[in-house]
Image (cartoon, rainbow, N blue to C red):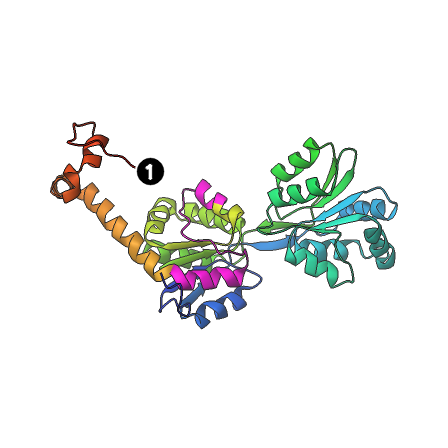
Amino acid sequence: MNLTGKPDFGGLHVAAFENRRREEMSRMIQRHGGVPHVSPALEEVPVGTNPQAVQAAQELVAGKFDLVIFLTGVGVEYFLQQVQEAVSQQELFSALGKVVTVARGPKPTAALKKRGLTPSLTVPEPNTWRELIDTLDAWGSLAGRRILVQQYGASNPQLLQALQARGAQVVPLVVYRWALPQDLQPLEENIRALVEGRRQVALFTSAQQVVHLCQVARRLGLDQPLQKAFHQVVVGSIGPTTSEVLRQHALPVDLEPEHPHMGHLVRTAAQQAKQLLEQKRAVFRVLDQATQEPQSVAHQLRNHPSWNSPFMKACRMEPAEVVPVWL
């Protein structure tokens, strides 16, 4: 792999599914020698009139919460917008300063600091709900604590259950939802291009992108062809949560960056994609030949020098001239 030189896609066509930072991602891919094809796979739709958010803000001002967990930066923004007419900003910020505030990662941290608020606790990388729970466990007991949880665009039942299992009273707060983009044409074009072999790299910056990609592929009747196509595409995942969802949908994960950030993902992919692509396609050719010409492949295997090695004989439960030992 190109581990020492400048990260370079070398002209590979890169599919990506970012929404809010799609232009920035396109520029990054281009700057690293790739041909970008960025088609948003989701959009964030804020809850309109949100009495739940207003009630949560009023209870926060009244001192009825012990902790507030902010999972996303955009969630911070929408929460403050939705309660601004019902609760004064000064009272709300004062209340947030008196409770333990938890920011899941750099985005909610930045959104809070933008308003002069510093979170009491920040969650370390890779910023999943598991690290969040570990952070709270290290902080202290949650038994009897009343916790307001600003959710993602979809609920995270594992996080809520983990908090409840520690004796906390959990109040989930929904301020926006994830939806498919109104214009699906760019996403559909990327799906068709992946199936037809016109994309060599696919980059995912959130788990929900995977869910929506597969959903739209099913609508097009291309879910199985897409799954097969990914055997010849280098798949980059921004972090563990996204990787987990990719595997749940029977899609491969070829690389994850050391840090779960978009820039690191693009650089890591640019550095590794060409060699990974060659390796994946070589394996696919062998597997495809095995499917199409099983007799020919079997003949090649039996004529390979390793076929009659002590190790292979032992694997086939055949007698060997020496007992193979491996560590």
Residue that badge 1 annotates: 327
The x, y position of residue 39, in whole percent, is 48, 60
Q: Is residue 262 magenta?
A: yes
Q: How many marks?
A: 1
Q: Quadrant of residue 66?
A: top right
Compared across the picture, whether 2 is left or right of 129 comes to left
The x, y position of residue 123, in whole percent, is 65, 50
Residue appearing at x 65%, y 53% in the figure: 72
The x, y position of residue 134, in whole percent, is 65, 42
Which stretch did the figure color magenta? 244-272
SS at badge 1: loop
Q: Is residue 261 magenta?
A: yes
Residue appearing at x 84%, y 58% in the figure: 89
Residue appearing at x 79%, y 45% in the figure: 56
The x, y position of residue 33, in whole percent, is 40, 71
Answer whether residue 38 is visible to the viewer in this image. no
Residue type at mark 1? Answer: Leu
